[in-house]
Each structure stands twice: as structure tokens, then as C-alpha cells.
Amino acid sequence: MKKKIVFIAAVTMLWSCSQSGKESTDYVTYEDAEAEFAATLSAGDTTEVLSAGSAVMDSLRAGNIDYALSQLRAADTNGNVADLSDEQRARLRARFERFPVVEWEIDYYDFSLPGLNDLKYRTYMRARDGKSGVPAMSLMLNPVKKDGKWYLCVKDAELPAKDAANAINPKQIIGER
């Protein structure tokens, strides 16, 4: 729980700092912050994120794990984007070698805040032929918008996601204006 609170505080700080000139004593709920961020987005943002995600997934399907990993980043709780660590890269490489992506589909995507978003894929380890029981895994990414550019970050299991048990209550107060 402590990591979640620290992350929310960091996201709030990032969001608050980007909202210069808005002095007020009003409280900001997570829902308010989401609505404000959504107002800054365009169809181009969605296209950019989905195109980048498709390129990564198509590379994995083609067996080009190195290229796919070179397109992924890590984000810390302060919103800093960095290259994957050697440990993260090795863990993901082992995953995609052991469970290759034969087919993939978008499960869902959701934009919440500059440093906290969801882009979830379902990957299949063999071709779906209309029969049930094809093994599948999920891959959750966190598209992060920093300095006007989108980065596809691997979503840590401890970060909140819309479809996870640790989803943030939209009415939760996360800061002040």
C-alpha cells in the first residue's frame, strides 16, 4: 500500500506542476485529474500510442525480441522514463522466448494521467483456430507522456490499473489545486 501512495503522490506532483497558474484551495480527485488530462489529448495521441504498441507486438510475433525490447522503457514513481534495466530486459527476453507471441490482440487501453495509463494486450502462444483453450498471457504497458512525447513503459504489477484489484478509487482525493 505504501508504494501505491508514493506513486499517487508522485503522479499528483507531476500533474500539479504541469498545471501552473491554477491557484486554488480546491481538492483534486483522481477523477478530476483524469478529466483534465483527457482534455489535453487528441486522436493523434491515441494513434501514436496504439501504433507504437502494434509495432512492438508485431515485432514479438515476428520473433524480433531485441527490437521489441528496444522500444520498451521503464518508469519510476517520480515519472522519470529510463531504458529497461538489464534485469528487466533479461526477464522479458526469457518470457518471450519461453512463451512466444504467435498472435496478439488489444485487451483494452485507457488514458488516466501523464504517468499512469493502461495498454493491455492478450498474447497467444499458438494460433487460434476457433477452438477454446488456446494458451494466452497478458502484457500490460504503461504509456507515459513526458515532455510531449509518448513512451511505452512496462507496467509494474504494483502500479494501479483499471482492471486490477489495485485500481484507484476515482473519488479519492489526490491533491490540491
Image (spheres, helix red, strand yellow):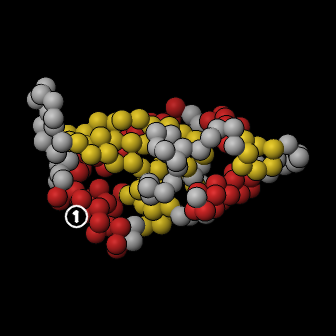
Q: Quadrant of residue 37?
A: top right
Q: As rendered, which of 95 and 36 lies closer to the eye?
A: 95
**Residue farthest bottom in this picture:** 86
Q: Circle 1 sits in a helix, a strand or a loop, which is it?
A: helix
Q: Measured along the vertical axis of the image, is residue 13 above or below residue 23?
A: below
Which residue has dot 1 on it? 94
**Residue farthest top in this picture:** 130
Residue 138 in sight: yes
Q: Position of residue 115 (x, y in %)?
A: 57, 52
Q: Position of residue 60 (x, y in %)?
A: 23, 51
Residue 117 in sight: no
Left or right relative to 172: residue 88: left
Q: Residue at x 48, y 57 (%)?
A: 158
Q: Residue at x 34, y 36 (%)?
A: 106
Q: Quadrant of residue 111?
A: top right
Left or right relative to 73: residue 67: left
| Badge 1 density bin: few <14, some 14–19, many ≥20, Cα 10 Å | few
Q: Residue at x 42, y 60 (%)?
A: 73
Q: Position of residue 51 (x, y in %)?
A: 38, 41
Q: As rendered, which of 43 and 89 lies closer to the eye?
A: 89
Left or right relative to 29: residue 106: left
Quadrant of the snapshot with the N terminus: bottom right
Q: Give the amino acid type for the residue marked by disc 1 in the picture.
A: Ala
Q: As rendered, which of 173 and 13 lies closer to the eye?
A: 173
Counting every numbered tag in the picture gives: 1
Left or right relative to 165: residue 177: right
Q: Measured along the vertical axis of the image, is residue 137 above or below residue 68?
A: above
Q: Residue at x 42, y 67 (%)?
A: 83
Q: Position of residue 170 (x, y in %)?
A: 64, 38
